[in-house]
Image (cartoon, rainbow, N blue to C red):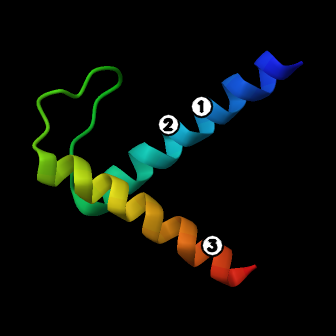
Amino acid sequence: MKGEFTQKGKEALERFKMEAASEVGVNLKQGYNGDLTSREAGSVGGQMVKKMIDAYKVQ
């Protein structure tokens, strides 16, 4: 049972990451993204955190 929840969580987080990347204009691809600059990777992570904080405030 635990493995099923873990896989669903990973898939949801991956979708969330792709959505955040498209919002900030970073072109992510499935798998390895080692060609991203630190600024691009940071903007994706920052957007994800911003959206999580906004979702928490709404609750």
Q: Position of residue 42 (x, y in %)?
A: 24, 54
Q: Residue 55: name its quadrant.
A: bottom right
- Kindly check if marks 2 and 1 are in contact, taking CB atoms under 8 A apart as contact: yes
Please tell me whether mark 1 sits on a helix, a strand or a loop. helix
Q: Residue 54: name its quadrant.
A: bottom right
Please tell me whether mark 3 sits on a helix, a strand or a loop. helix
- Residue beneath disc 3: 55
Q: Position of residue 50 (x, y in %)?
A: 44, 70
- Looking at the picture, which amino acid does disc 1 mark? Glu
- Residue beneath disc 2: 14
Could you tell me which residue is drawn at 50 percent across and 68 percent down?
Answer: 51
- Residue that lies at the very extreme toward the right in this rendered image: 1
* Few, some or many residues within 10 Å of mark 1 (<14, 14–19, 20+): few
- Looking at the picture, which amino acid does disc 3 mark? Ala
Up the image or down, 30 lies above or below 47; here it is above
In the rendered structure, which disc, 3 or 2, sits on the residue that comes first in sequence? 2
